[in-house]
Image: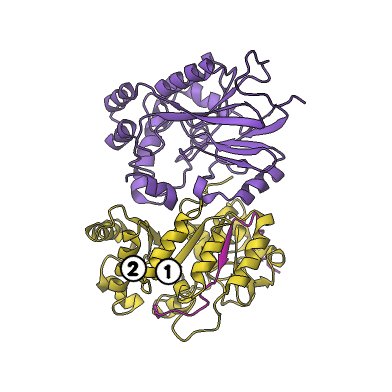
Amino acid sequence: MEKRPFVALQALDELWFQVGGTLCNLSCTHCFVSCNPSNDSFKFLGLERVKRFLRESVDLGVKEYYFTGGEPFLNRELLPILEETLCYGPASVLTNGTVFQEKNVRELRRIADGSRYTLELRVSIDGPTAEINDPLRGAGAFDAALHGVDLLVQEGFLPIITVVQTWPEEQSLVLLAQFADVLRRRGYTRPRLKLLPTLRIGMEAMRTRGYTPEERVHAEMLEGYDVQRLICSHSRIVTDRGVAVCPILIEEPGAHLGETLADALTPFAVSHAACYTCYLYGSICVNASTASPGRDR
Amino acid sequence: MSRPQDVGRAKKSPAEAPVALFGGVYSNHIALEAAIESARSRGALQLYCLGDLGAFGPHPDLVFPVLMRHGVQTMAGNYDDSLARGLEDCQCGYTDPRDNHFARLSYRYTFEKTSSANKRWLAQLPRQIRFEYCGARVLLSHGSPRRMNEFLWESTTPDHFIEKLFREFACDAIFATHTGIPWTRRLGGDRLFVNVGVLGRPANDGTTSVTYALLSPGAEGLAVEIVRVNYDYRALAREMREEELPLEFVETIETGWWTTCLEILPGKERARGKH
């Protein structure tokens, strides 16, 4: 029988929260978790549940906290959740940027200024033009997200714009430069852009294609490979159904490891198709300010 | 066990004399000389360098004789490790194309200009240094005690993460560099985490000075001071121009603002800079 490619958790450095569940105001055609306005298969996380895991994270020495969904800002408890989290450590929110209101952004500013730790806002916009972005994220999403970026920049934030690469690799440099120009012209004078590969699961598998049977990680592929590149060697995610291995695989059977962080520290077999993308590209989900992925010894 | 002493007390025994901790030198031999002079004038007998001797600046070989002449106890950083092993890059792990472009220029220049003898010297450097100071177990690391190239920024390093490092590495004080921006955090029980900053370039604060850390016995436990060093940055900038290093690097030396490697800065640290 073939040996399974188990990866041990080396240290729980990043704790993720599926704080927005699977609810999203957008229905992106490349979403790897199939989030949309009516998908409530994963529910919002409440402040009390987040607090419980924040407390548990202390002894484990968690270094960073990430909040994703769905759209996290649909969760009305998100701001108090962030304020609480920033008492523990740095927080990053992954948002589509389309649901900000001025008063919420002002409140975010107050919360960010009240902590010694960084609050990062990562806004997903998938290209420098509506013509590239909107077929993926929906009509009007480009303008709505840029308006969200404007609000953040006006309050002094430097949002990280995450861009899923849906074009041939050789076009990336030009498109990123074009995107930076678009942002500068709107007043975001020092834009931060982060390019991400697509993940061929969820909606994306239907938009383009899923993984082929050959695109899998096998045990022998981990020999001599730096497993620090894999997010499952340093992350876990809290959902309303328990703790899962990583933010990519929450809908997958076998990805849920237990009810507490202590339950979820077990090794994980990176046998899922999407693990192949993580294997190739490294921990794409974490911020660049985090330990250099894939270069550690 | 020696008792913590007041910083100002005269005639310290060698064990109680201040200790100087230098971060990445980045080939800035002029700032290194100035920092050593500063540390000696402050009574430091033991001098340590936490690695990354080359990068960014001119004439990398000039740093080595300075370190040796002054008996600076030196450990390896990721740049030193890359040079010693002939790796393709500096292991900083940039993903931004512009940052990568400049990192490659810097690494290629430093690799070509570092002698084989100095590369061999880099290969034998320790990856950590431990010593006892005023009863405290002190651990010197480059990035972090667990990873040579881990960035420990003030705004992304929780107290409980540092506590874990103290537990796992059985120490009371940790000194690191690698990020380029100094900071200090005191935790319960007189324990201490210090990022000593770097000598190689300013700390993205709009000044031309660079920093090192001075450890000394305090009234209550260890005392640490981030010491600013002014040096002849114009002379360094001149050398960099003569060597045709990127003008973006020269600008950083002359203005105190980082122009490259910005991707790795967390939001709070980035917001304090200009670019």
For the N terminus of chain A, the image quarter is: bottom right
Q: Residues within 10 Å of mark 1 (few under 14, many from 20)?
A: many
Q: Chain of mark 1?
A: A
Q: Quadrant of residue B102?
A: top left
Residue B135 magenta: no
Q: Spot the residue most to the bottom.
A: A38
- In the drawing, what numbered circle is on residue A148? 2
Asked if badge 2 and badge 1 are on a common chain, one would say yes
Amino acid type at circle 2 is Gly
Q: Position of residue A112 (x, y in %)?
A: 46, 57
Contact, mark 2 vs mark 1 (Cβ under 8 Å): yes
Q: Position of residue A211 (x, y in %)?
A: 49, 73
Along the polypeptide, which appears first: circle 2 or circle 1?
A: 1
Q: Spot the residue most to the right.
A: B1
- Colour given to chain A in the rendered image: yellow
Secondary structure beneath dot 1 equals strand
The span shown in magenta is: A1-29
Q: Chain of mark 2?
A: A
Q: Disc 2 or disc 1, which is closer to the eye? A: 2
Q: Quadrant of residue A138?
A: bottom left
Residue A3 seen in this snapshot: no
Q: Position of residue A100 (x, y in %)?
A: 37, 71
Q: Which secondary structure class fits the magenta region best? A: loop
- In the drawing, what numbered circle is on residue A83? none
Residue B62 seen in this snapshot: yes
Q: Spot the residue most to the left.
A: A185
Amino acid type at circle 1 is Thr
Q: Which residue is mark 1?
A: A95
